[in-house]
Image (spheres, helix red, strand yellow):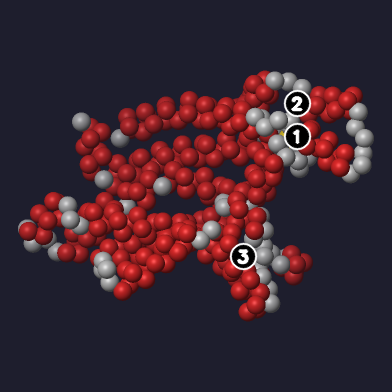
Amino acid sequence: MLKYIGKRLLIIIPTVFIISLACFFIIQLPPGDFISSYITTMQAEGEQVTQEVVAQLRAEYGLDHPWYYQYFLWMKGIILHGDWGYSFEYQRPVIAIINERMAMTITISLITMLFTYLVSIPIGIYSALHQYSVGDYIFSGLGFLGMATPNFLLAIVLMYCSFKLTGDPLIGLFSDEMLEGGGFKISFIAEFMKRMVIPIIVIGTAGTCSVIRTVRAQMLDEMVKQYTLTARAKGVAEKVITYKYCVRAALNPVVSSLATSLSRIFTGSTISGIVMNLPIQGPVLYQALRSQDMYLAGSILFIMAVLVCVGTLMSDVLLAWLDPRIRFSERS
């Protein structure tokens, strides 16, 4: 297993480098840069900008160099000094902007993930064990409905229903009264948890429905394989066959999704975050890409790439531990 992990770690290093290079290059593919967007905004407001001012701004922001030289300086700062660059849009260091929203992003994403797996895995197992029952049809219908409904549309519908029922659309996680009161009082926590209900349902629904379909399909596939038939013929209890063998094998695709789960924890849901006014990383990345704030967008994408690689390593290790067939094939 140590040799297996060592190989994966060696693969991660060039993979992260190539991804970071590709991300930085793609960010600069659209015509213009941050200065172009900034000047367009100034001209729309009626201000006149000369070419001398444009050249001075490009030199000040370091945009007068080729993209590969900018990439070299950016990576040099990250590796040697831990400096992720300076955000043109926010006029602040990139790491400060990321840290500002990190706690809330992780909180929302982890709660959503717990909701997704705690709801979807038991439902998927139940649907497989009671195939074509009334409950299976109900959960399958809800699953298809959840997968087909866009998250932003569901968010708008839920906020409208909340406004009609309570007079408050519950936009954002903090009301004006919460921000003015401050502190972690019981009323503050209760209001915060109330405002978390819609984001959890909206962001967790698509993932929940997808996992339900995956677990159900995998369980149905495992329950008719030769090893389960052999176990039944030998008199092994049905619960042991189901939960010790079939469920364990059916969780392989769920564990494989851990590779992208870590990056989703870091960014959150971008479109849903914009619609519900959530203070998470996704809307920041969207705005950075729109304004061509290359250091902020590149840093977020770079961290996402690292988290995907780490998540892939973790899922590989968990799969090797979860499924003996993977361990035996690796040894052979």
Cβ atoms under marks 1 and 3 closer than 8 Å: no
Q: CB atoms at circles 2 and 3 under 8 Å apart? A: no
Q: Give the secondary structure at mark 2.
A: loop
In this rendering, is residue 148 above or below 330?
Answer: below
> Label 2 sits on what residue type?
Leu
* 10 Å crowding of disc 3: few (<14), some (14-19), many (20+): some
The mark that comes first in sequence, 2 or 3, is 2
Which corner quadrant of the image does residue 37 belong to? top right
Whole-percent x and y of residue 14?
48, 25
CA distance for labels 1 and 2: 9 Å
Q: Which mark is residue 34?
A: 1
Residue 60 relative to residue 124: left or right: right
Which image quarter is the C terminus in?
A: top left
What residue is rendered at 65% in x and 29% in y?
29
Cα distance in 3D space between marks 2 and 3: 40 Å
Q: Nearer the viewer, residue 224 or 178?
A: 224
Q: From the viewer's perspective, is the residue at label 2 or at label 3 nearer?
A: 3
- The amino acid sitting under disc 3 is Ile
Q: In the image, what residue occupies the spot 87% across and 40% down?
A: 42
Estimate the x, y position of residue 208 in percent, counting from the top left. Answer: 43, 60
Quadrant assignment, res 259: top left
- Distance between the Cα atoms at labels 1 and 3? 32 Å
Q: Secondary structure at mark 3?
A: helix
First of labels 1, 2 by sequence position: 1
Residue bearing mark 3: 156
Q: x, y (%) of residue 109?
A: 53, 55
Q: Are marks 1 and 2 in contact (CB under 8 Å)?
A: yes
Q: Earlier in the sequence, mark 1 or mark 3?
A: 1
Q: Position of residue 71 (x, y in %)?
A: 64, 25
